[in-house]
Image (cartoon, rainbow, N blue to C red):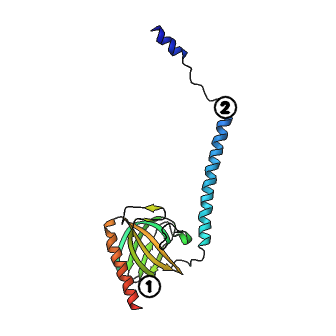
């Protein structure tokens, strides 16, 4: 027993931190570095919006949007340049993720976003729909994302949506593509 008591007494006791100025300096330095990173990300977002400043304002929904073909509630995951799933479009709030209520009518696609700017895509500007697995900043399982392609100004845009009921996505692809085919044949 005496042997164990001697070993316990020989163990050094933990020492308290006595160099507080160095500890505080490192903490303040780390916080300043994190703040700098956030500021740089914000500046990059604003710069991207400036580069996309040639994008015209988003159209508002008409007073009478027409008969509803389909409706969904879910998430709007953002818009990118068509075919370039990492080239996010941030102008006019198109880069802001939000909840969404999307309605397809004979006159177009009405996107209502609480907390973000709503927009309307006239039927003549719709170019098709497909199921995909990702759009800038969001990757899902294969076919987990509804991507609707449309034209705005001189750009083709892909907008990504995820319905609260993903089983509805194929019906949306069929309906949007049928509407775009009808618009093409009418021209």
Is residue 115 shown above or below 7?
A: below
Q: In the structure shown, which secondary structural element does the residue marked by tag 2 occupy? A: loop
Q: Identify the residue shown where x is 65% and y is 29%.
A: 18
Query: Residue at 43% of width from left, 69% of height from top?
Result: 160
SS category of the residue bearing label 1: helix
Work out whether residue 66 can be spotted: no
Q: Where residue 98 sits in the image (x, y, percent)? A: 46, 64
Q: Is residue 28 above or below residue 5?
A: below
Give the spatial CA distance, label 2 vs label 1.
69 Å
* Residue 162 percent coordinates (x, y): 39, 66
Rendered residue at 37%/61% (across/down): 141
Q: Position of residue 47 (x, y in %)?
A: 62, 67
111 left or right, relative to 166: right
Residue 148's quadrant in the figure? bottom left
For the C terminus, the image quarter is bottom left
* Sequence-first tag of 2 and 1: 2
- Say left or right for 18 vs 129: right
Q: Mark 1 points at which residue?
A: 124
Please give the label number shown on residue 39. none
Relative to residue 11, is residue 159 depicted above or below? Answer: below
- Residue underneath mark 2: 19
- In terms of depth relative to the viewer, which is nearer, 149 or 72? 149
């Amino acid at each position: 027993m005496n042997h164990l008591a001697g070993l316990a007494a020989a163990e050094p006791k933990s020492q308290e931190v006595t160099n507080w100025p160095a500890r505080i300096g490192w903490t303040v330095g780390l916080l300043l570095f994190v703040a700098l990173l956030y500021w740089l990300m914000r500046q990059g977002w604003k710069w991207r919006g400036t580069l996309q400043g040639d994008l015209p304002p988003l159209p508002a929904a008409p007073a009478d949007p027409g008969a509803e073909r389909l409706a969904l509630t879910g998430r709007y995951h953002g818009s990118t340049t068509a075919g370039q799933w990492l080239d996010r479009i941030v102008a006019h709030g198109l880069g802001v993720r939000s909840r969404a209520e999307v309605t397809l009518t004979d006159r177009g696609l009405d996107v209502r976003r609480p907390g973000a700017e709503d927009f309307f895509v006239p039927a003549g500007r719709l170019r098709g729909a497909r199921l995909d697995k990702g759009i800038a900043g969001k990757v899902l399982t294969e076919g987990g994302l509804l991507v609707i392609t449309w034209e705005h100004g001189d750009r083709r845009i892909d907008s990504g949506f995820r319905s609260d009921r993903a089983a509805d996505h194929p019906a949306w692809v069929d309906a949007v593509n049928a509407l775009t085919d009808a618009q093409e044949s009418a021209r």
